[in-house]
Image (cartoon, rainbow, N blue to C red):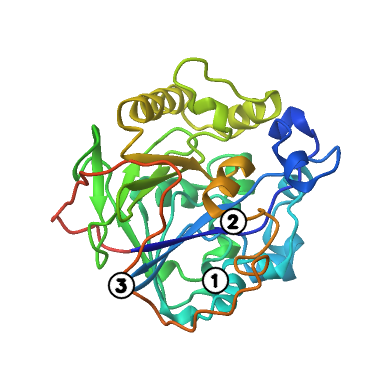
Amino acid sequence: MRVHHLNCVSACPLGGLLMDGGNGKASMGNASLSARLTCHCLLVETEAGLVLVDTGYGTRDVADPRGRLSAFFLALVRPELREEMTAIRQIEGMGFDPRDVRHIVLSHLDFDHAGGLDDFPEARVHLLADERDSAMAQATALDRMRYRPQQWSTRHNWEVYVEGQGEPWFGFACARELAGVRGDIVMVPLVGHTLGHAGIAVRREDDWLLLAADAYFYHGEMDPDRPRCTPGLAMYQTLMEKDRKARKRNQRRLRELGRAHGSEVTIVCAHDVLEFERLAGRRHDVPIGAEEGREPSGRQYASAGARTPVGSWRGMGGTAASPPESHW
C-alpha cells in the first residue's frame, strides 16, 4: 500500500516555542508569537480504493467557521482555514476522484479531526463505539465545544466497534480489523484524550506506521529515557483529557513500543510539525504536490508501492473476524 501524508489545516495558537518547542518557527523561518501545529492525516491507496485516516477540517469549516466550530476553540487554537489544505482539495490536487475515498478511519470525533467528514458523503466511517457514545452524550460544556454535530451529516455511514474485541498487535490488545478494509489497517484503542480515542496502524511495505493521533502532542513525549513536553501542550492535554490515568498509561506503552520495536513501527502523532515534515518530506504549510511542482497522478487508486519509511516497525498485525456493532 502507498501512504500519503496530508496536513489538513494548521493550528496557530498563541504561545510560540512554549507551545510547539520552536518547531513551527524553524519550519516557517521566522519568529512569531504563534505556534504551529499540524493536523496530520493519512491517505492510503489500497486495492479496494482510497482510505482516509482522520479528515482534519473540511471545506464547510472553512466557509462557515463560526457556524461550525465553537468560539472558544476558534480563539484558542486559531486554525489557519485555507481551503487548499483541506483533505478533499489535496486529494483532488493529486489527481484522485474524491469519490474513490471508500473508507474513513477516525481516531476520534474532535472538531479538528472530523471536520472533513461532510466532504466525503459516500465514505464508510469507522470509529470506536465509546467515542460515538461520548460525543453524542454532550455531557459537559467542554464536550459540547469539542464535539460538533454540525460536522456529522454522514453519521448514517458510521460503523462502530466495541473496545475489547480483536487480536493483539505488538502487545496492544483489542486492535480491530475494519469491515470492508483489509487487515493492513487496524484500529488500536488508545483511550485517555477521549473515551473512545484510537490510534490507526497502517502496514507499509517494510514496516507499520502508527498514527497515534492525540495520544500525545509533542515528539519529546516519546523519548524512552527522558520524556518531555512543552508547557503549553502539557496544559492543553490536561484541559482536553477525559481519563488522565489511561492517557498517561498509554503514553508509557507507546514509549515502550518504540523502545522494543523501533525498527518495526514508526509512531507519529497528529499535531507535531517536526514529525510531519520528516515523514512527508515537505513543509507542513504546503499542500501535497505543490512544493515539488509535480503533475497530478491521475490514478483512481493503486495497489502496489509504498513509501520508504523514516523510522519503522515491521511484522505482526492483529486481525479480527468478528463483525462490528451495527452502524448508527
Give the mark nearer the N terminus: 3 vs 2.
2
Residue at 63% x, 44% y is: 273
Say left or right for 32 vs 82: right
Residue kind at label 3, given as amino acid type: Ser
Q: Which residue is mark 3?
A: 303
Q: Which residue is mark 1?
A: 118
Residue at 56% x, 27% y is: 220
Query: Residue 37 occupies which quadrant of the picture?
Result: top right
Give the mark nearer the N terminus: 1 vs 2.
1
Say left or right for 181 vs 37: left
Mark 3 lies on a secondary structure that is loop
Between label 1 and label 2, give the one nearer the viewer.
1
Q: Position of residue 254 (x, y in %)?
A: 39, 30
Residue kind at label 1, given as amino acid type: Asp
User: In this view of the protein, which residue sits in the foreground, 17 or 69?
Assistant: 17
Q: Position of residue 145 (x, y in %)?
A: 64, 47
Between label 3 and label 1, give the one nearer the viewer.
3
* Furthest residue toward top: 225
Disc 3 to disc 1: CB gap under 8 Å: no
User: How far apart in space, not on screen, are marks 3 and 2 (Cα)?
Assistant: 35 Å
User: How far apart in space, not on screen, are marks 3 and 1 (Cα)?
Assistant: 26 Å
Q: Which residue is mark 2?
A: 148
Disc 3 to disc 2: CB gap under 8 Å: no
